């Protein structure tokens, strides 16, 4: 079946301010125009007819993110004749469990992290993805094996199967800096961890403070340091060791973990951090990057995830006033280019033919490119056209993602709640205050829930 693929203005007009999409005829996606794989959509339409079928989706996306996703779903509806209904909820994690237990789950669930998906798979609430999906992911996603591992869980019989397909990712392995400051002092962006440490020491010799770090976050104080440790675990150990740490197959006080924490401690020593190590726990993470923008600057670099520009001074232009580089790996350790981040994954909670078709649609370059054009979306899909990204910032972050040799999810989000959002946070506050890595890791290990 072939349909007209020019989508109506009412359905697919993009929100104001999406500069890239707005460059196409009044903010419209118009068939055949823009850096999108229209031929894929036409081919998909000719091969899939789901007329009269309905697909329901529950996810965490609200407001603009929901609108962006619904814009994509409209293309699937137009191409296939299916009707797709998405409901966004800020209590998605609770609602999907209630619906599944009541036998009224939607066709698809969009999980904000793998832990809940794994739990639902173990209870028999998820349907495994098609046999060739794992091969497709391994072949088409950068660090493809990582994504397969993150989406593979035990079912209710204890057998492992692929249940999760990641769609939209964020990157945490970023260092923010002011290009003008680097230019004034003759500093160059480092490409290895060895170079980053040398640069840090050079800044101190020049009388400058290399780092701004803030761990404050109210009841969640300490979490920014856990991201540092996770990134450094990936840069000092094989990915398998990271996985063993997250699952407690190796204890939290293993020498590998102690070493990663002490690597973080190196950045806190002496004059390397604004205010000194004792001050970082009292600095709110939202305020910590502000020292970059002071005149003279209070610090030269700030390691934080892709969301941090929301807390930069009003009017700051990323790519001009401030920029970022990849938090580099050690050249001597030869562990590739690991990336730490998070993301959302799709799982089938109520199977149907059209639901399978929609999952197949999510594997097209076209689907990723339409989302890329609408802001706040990053993909590890290597074949998607990077010109589709809404701006240069997203494009550069997308390049970091597609250059990754390993991707790992935020470790604290995968640990038991009492640890990942409890004792691990506290341990990092205690460590920054002067406790030893051995002391704090033993305390976390002692808190790990018994089987």
Image (cartoon, rainbow, N blue to C red):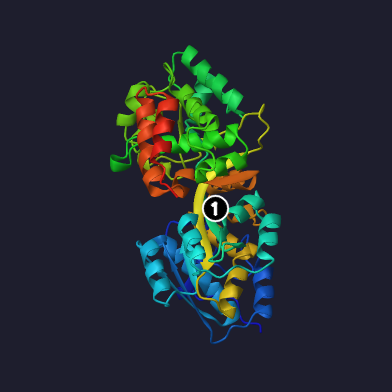
| Whole-percent x, y for residue 264 in the image | 48, 28
Left or right: residue 445 versus residue 231 is left
Residue drawn at the location 60% of the way across and 78% of the way down? 79
Quadrant, the N terminus: bottom right
Is any atom of residue 367 visible in this view?
A: yes
Left or right: residue 252 versus residue 163 is left
The quarter of the displayed image where residue 47 is located: bottom right
| Whole-percent x, y for residue 433 in the image | 34, 24
> SS at mark 1?
loop
Q: Which residue is mark 1?
A: 378
Left or right: residue 124 versus residue 159 is left
Task: Please tell me which residue lies in front, 210 or 147.
Answer: 147
Is any atom of residue 320 visible in this view?
A: no
Residue drawn at the location 35% of the way across and 62% of the way down? 91
Q: Is residue 320 above or below residue 85?
A: above
| Whole-percent x, y for residue 122 in the image | 51, 63
């Amino acid at each position: 079946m072939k349909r007209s693929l020019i989508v109506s203005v009412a359905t697919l007009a993009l929100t104001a301010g999406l500069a890239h999409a707005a460059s196409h005829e009044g903010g419209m996606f118009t068939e055949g125009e823009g850096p999108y794989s229209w031929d894929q959509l036409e081919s998909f339409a000719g091969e899939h007819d789901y007329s009269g079928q309905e697909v329901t989706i529950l996810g965490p996306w609200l407001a603009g993110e929901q609108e962006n996703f619904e814009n994509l779903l409209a293309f699937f509806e137009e191409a296939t004749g299916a009707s797709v209904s998405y409901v966004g909820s800020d209590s998605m994690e609770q609602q999907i469990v209630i619906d599944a237990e009541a036998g009224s789950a939607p066709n698809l669930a969009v999980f904000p992290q793998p832990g809940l998906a794994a739990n639902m798979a173990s209870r028999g609430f998820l349907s495994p993805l098609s046999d060739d999906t794992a091969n497709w992911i391994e072949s088409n996603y950068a660090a493809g094996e990582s994504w397969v591992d993150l989406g593979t869980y035990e079912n209710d019989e204890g057998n492992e199967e692929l249940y999760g397909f990641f769609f939209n990712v964020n990157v945490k392995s970023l260092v923010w800096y002011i290009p003008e400051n680097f230019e004034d002092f003759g500093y160059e962006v480092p490409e290895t961890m060895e170079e980053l440490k040398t640069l840090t020491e050079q800044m101190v010799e020049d009388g400058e403070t290399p780092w701004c770090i803030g761990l404050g976050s109210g009841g969640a104080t300490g979490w920014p340091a856990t991201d540092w440790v996770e990134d450094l675990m990936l840069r000092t150990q094989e990915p398998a060791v990271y996985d063993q740490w997250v699952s407690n197959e190796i204890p939290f006080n293993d020498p590998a973990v102690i070493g990663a924490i002490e690597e973080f401690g190196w950045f806190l020593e002496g004059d390397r951090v604004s205010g000194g190590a004792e001050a970082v726990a009292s600095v709110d993470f939202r305020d910590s990057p502000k020292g970059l923008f002071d005149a003279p600057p209070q610090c030269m670099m700030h390691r934080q995830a892709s969301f941090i520009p929301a807390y930069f001074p009003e009017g700051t232009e990323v790519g001009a006033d401030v920029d970022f580089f990849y938090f580099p790996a050690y050249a001597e350790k030869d562990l590739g280019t690991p990336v730490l981040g998070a993301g959302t994954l799709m799982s089938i909670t109520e199977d149907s033919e059209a639901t399978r078709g929609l999952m197949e649609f999510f594997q097209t370059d076209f689907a990723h490119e339409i989302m890329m054009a609408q802001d706040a979306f990053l993909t590890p899909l290597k074949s998607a056209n990077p010109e589709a990204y809404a701006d240069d910032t997203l494009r550069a972050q997308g390049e970091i993602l597609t250059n990754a040799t390993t991707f790992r999810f935020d470790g604290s989000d995968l640990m038991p709640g009492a640890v990942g959002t409890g004792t691990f946070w506290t341990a990092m506050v205690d460590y920054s205050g002067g406790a030893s890595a051995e002391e704090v890791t033993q305390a976390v290990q002692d808190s790990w829930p018994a089987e």
